[in-house]
Image: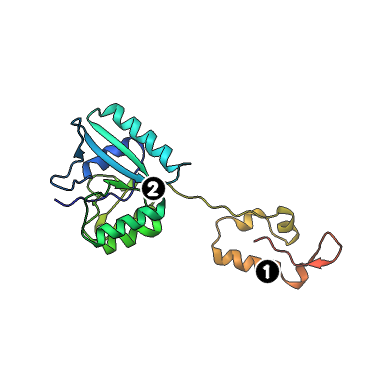
């Protein structure tokens, strides 16, 4: 049976569900047996500052409870992971591929649409109601969910409170609004009657976004 790759990994206890879905390059759906008789699970990851340490901690916790499993975390540059997957899968070669990969959201749909049947459907293994809906959507195609959300990148908007107040706005005006509303607020703050003096005494437009 062809190996099916899992496109994301959740730390700690969730690895148990993921290992159930790991394929081999020969037969069966379990992880490949290592020389010591343990089930070997190979994970491709990148980023020594976050992903690798988290994967190593997850592997440690899982192996402590499952002595018959050996999880190997292999570090690659993200571009190398992408290239190796595309090269192998486009050639129909699954030998040498890992059981689990980490992938950025932007590439998941490219993988599962370009290589249907090559990634493991996790919908019968994981309760996805525990995850943010938009993260699950990234992993979904048709009725299958081909991975597990791993992390969420956070972005923030910073602004000068004094500029905002001089433009006639409060922090509440920036709460629970859309990007379009933010843009309109910014345009409003730049009206000629909302000019304020700069540090040199000349006038300039308010700009908080």
Q: Which residue is mark 1?
A: 188
Asked which quadrant contains residue 167, the reply is bottom right
C-alpha span from label 1 to label 2: 48 Å
In percent of width and height, residue 132 lies at: 39, 50
The image shows residue 145, relative to residue 33, as above or below, that is below
In percent of width and height, residue 16 lies at: 27, 37
Camera sees residue 150 = yes
Dot 2: what SS? Answer: loop
Mark 1 vs 2, N-terminal side: 2
Q: Which residue is mark 2?
A: 76
Using a 10 Å C-alpha cutoff, classify the residue at mark 1 as few (fewer than 14 neighbours), some (14 to 19) or many (20 or more).
some
Q: Residue at x 22, y 30 (%)?
A: 68
Badge number at residue 153: none
Q: Point out the residue furthest to the bottom here.
A: 192
Camera sees residue 142 = no
The image shows residue 148, relative to residue 13, as above or below, that is below
Dot 1: what SS? Answer: helix
Q: Residue at x 34, y 40 (%)?
A: 73
In percent of width and height, residue 127 lies at: 29, 45
Q: Residue at x 25, y 58 (%)?
A: 89
In percent of width and height, residue 112 lies at: 28, 59
Q: Residue at x 74, y 54 (%)?
A: 162
């Amino acid at each position: 049976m062809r190996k099916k790759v899992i496109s994301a990994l959740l730390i700690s206890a969730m690895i148990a569900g993921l290992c159930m879905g790991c394929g081999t390059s020969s037969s069966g759906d379990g992880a490949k047996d290592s020389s010591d008789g343990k089930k070997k699970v190979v994970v491709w990851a990148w980023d020594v500052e976050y992903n690798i340490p988290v994967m190593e901690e997850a592997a440690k916790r899982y192996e402590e409870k499952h002595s018959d499993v050996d999880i190997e975390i292999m570090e690659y540059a993200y571009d190398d992971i992408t290239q190796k997957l595309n090269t192998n899968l486009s050639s129909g070669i699954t030998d040498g591929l890992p059981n689990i990969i980490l992938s950025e959201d932007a590439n998941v749909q490219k993988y599962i649409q370009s290589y249907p049947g090559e990634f493991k459907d996790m919908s019968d293994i994981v309760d996805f109601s525990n995850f943010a809906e938009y993260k699950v959507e990234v992993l979904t195609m048709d009725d299958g969910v081909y991975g597990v959300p791993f992390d969420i990148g956070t972005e923030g908007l910073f602004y000068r409170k004094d500029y905002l107040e001089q433009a006639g706005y409060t922090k509440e005006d920036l709460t629970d609004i859309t990007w379009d509303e933010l843009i309109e607020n910014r345009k409003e703050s730049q009206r000629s009657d909302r000019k304020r003096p700069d540090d040199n005494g000349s006038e300039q437009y308010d700009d908080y976004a």
